Image (cartoon, coloured by chain):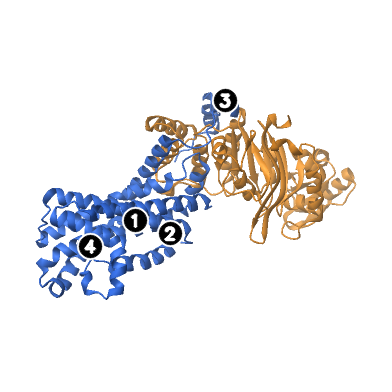
Chain colours: A blue, B orange
Amino acid sequence: MPEKSIAAIRKEVLLVSNLIIPASERQLRARPTPKETFTESAAMGWRALIKMRRNPEQFFDVIIQPFLFTAMFAYIFGGAISGSVQDYLPIVITGILVQTALTACMATGVQLREDMDKGVFNRFRSLPMARMAPLVGPMTADVLRYAIAATLTLLTGFLMGYRPGGWFWGVAAGWVLVVFSGWSLSWIFAWLGTVARSAQAVQGIGMMIMFPLTFLSNAFVPVESMPGWLQWFVNINPVSLVISAVRDLMNDGAFTMQVVWAVVGCIVVIVIFAPLAVRSYSRKV
Amino acid sequence: MSSDDSAVLAHGLVKRFGDFTAVDGIDLEVKTGEVFGVLGPNGAGKTTMLNMLATLLPIDEGSASIFGVDVAKNPHMIRQLVGVTGQYASVDENMTGDENLRLFGMLLGLSSKQARTTASELLERFGLEEAADRQIKNFSGGMRRRLDLAASLISRPPLIFLDEPTTGLDPRTRGQMWDTIRDLVKEGATILLTTQYLDEADQLADRIAVIDHGLKVAEGTSVDLKSQVGNSTLYFRLADKELVPQGAAVVEAVLGETPQITPEAAGISIALPDPNRAADVLIGLREQNLEITAAEVRQPTLDEVFMVLTGKPTDSGDGDEGDDAREVDRSDSQGGATRE
């Protein structure tokens, strides 16, 4: 590129009167205000969206997995578990909705970790910005990924003949719950991302958390078919709570206590893991 | 109060990583409006010290204040006062130059419109407007550094930390960076820069601290330091190899010492008691009609500075004299000023 002459650059620098604001003329704030925290998180979300646009391969998991898993699980297990694929759909679609959201969460943690190793995070740490913004921003931008995953899973289900009893509002409410639980549970993986040594470690540990959570739940098989000691875990598994709530909303169009418990469960996860994640992030160098 | 005109005031800074002590009790005072250079080899603790002052690393022992604000107690305030330009360009590879500056602008509280204006102003000022829409991964090293510095200026900080601002840059880009730094000082910025190059500290810094193995081994103006280091060296090459003995004779006649000769290159070098004597030698050569093809008065290298200041080469030993220097610093009378 044609470089500017040094003289030209210097002249321009000198033209601008207050390139520097002296310390004595500054109003220093001891901590960021809630409004600043919000706008900074939004700016970090904007950055995450730009990066998504530049690396569309980030979307492979949330685009392919809904088709692949829905079809695979329905045709393989449908007959054995529910007698027919058609009867299995109300169970498996809701299960896979939550499972894909969880997988997408794990990717959120892995990408956050990868991102944090970059030089630009040193600058974020040196700026007077809210410590939670670099986490909240990209995590919230990832809501887009959960939304895509949930929508595509539902579409696959409809194509295969899933006719939810909750009709439009039930399905819409279930969809919102899935996306919200994705955002909440991603705080677990964000925390992992801040404590693990590498992105690979987040991936490895994430798998070990994700598989028991999804398979030791009511996602794919009726809980009654499991041994008693396992049922105990399955019933307190937050993933089961969310799946039951999504089933109530989508299949029955009913706003039950299950839904309340699912939302409470998600909030508990945020309350525990968000402060942990923000704290270990701000300690990291 | 002595801290009134201090931009940075640090006492006994210590940073340990496990058993390794990266910074071992450094005192530092940077006055408002000056360029302060921290000179030292790789691994001396320069970056660690800067990171502690920039709130990027917790301070293990000692205290530091910036414009009277305590670094450990008020990190959020410190971040409003300091612009940091890191050793490795801390900008986002996957974003364009314009997007990077807009992002940092918004993170510093500008509206998206203000951020856009500031970004285009800074891009223009740093001669980067052609690259505004290019992703950073396609930038040259010099462009990255300039963008990095531009990003540090969005908040118009009164104090700027530059961590090895020109390491790895070609001489021309390096000169541009130096000019930019000088302009910032004219605008009223205080600058704390680290460097491995004596000539960079010499060119830019009003005062220099030499750091080795986490200890400050010397401090002063570049003239002070060089007078401790001593002689500079004159090196010249003659046009005609056959005339090297005559050239050597001129040197002996002027300075009274026998020069070193590299016959293959027709090169002659001699240590100078005073750099001004170089002219005498060159005049002597002219009088004898000896034609030269090259001549330079070399500054002492960083290695030579270290040899003199620590009595050891840069890469070994922890330097007894270093400990002495630290004792001297600790007894500095401005001791308690930061604690108020």
Which residue is identified by label 1? A185
For the residues labelled 2 and 3, the Cα–Cα distance comes to 42 Å
**Tags 2 and 3 in contact by the CB under 8 Å rule?**
no
Asked whether the residues under marks 4 and 3 belong to the same chain, the reply is: yes
For the residues labelled 2 and 1, the Cα–Cα distance comes to 11 Å
> Tag 3: residue type?
Glu
* Chain on which label 3 sits: A
Residue A192's disc number: 2
Asked whether the residues under marks 2 and 1 belong to the same chain, the reply is: yes
- Work out whether B112 lies above or below B266: above
Which residue is identified by label 4? A96
Q: Which comes sooner in the sequence, label 2 or label 4?
A: 4
> Tag 1: residue type?
Leu
Left or right of A149: which side holds A202? right
Q: Is residue A166 among what the camera can see?
A: yes
Asked whether the residues under marks 3 and 1 belong to the same chain, the reply is: yes
Q: Which comes sooner in the sequence, label 2 or label 1?
A: 1
* Chain on which label 4 sits: A
* Residue drawn at the location 64% of the way across and 47% of the way down: B49
* Chain on which label 1 sits: A
Q: Locate the N terminus of chain A by quadrant.
A: top left
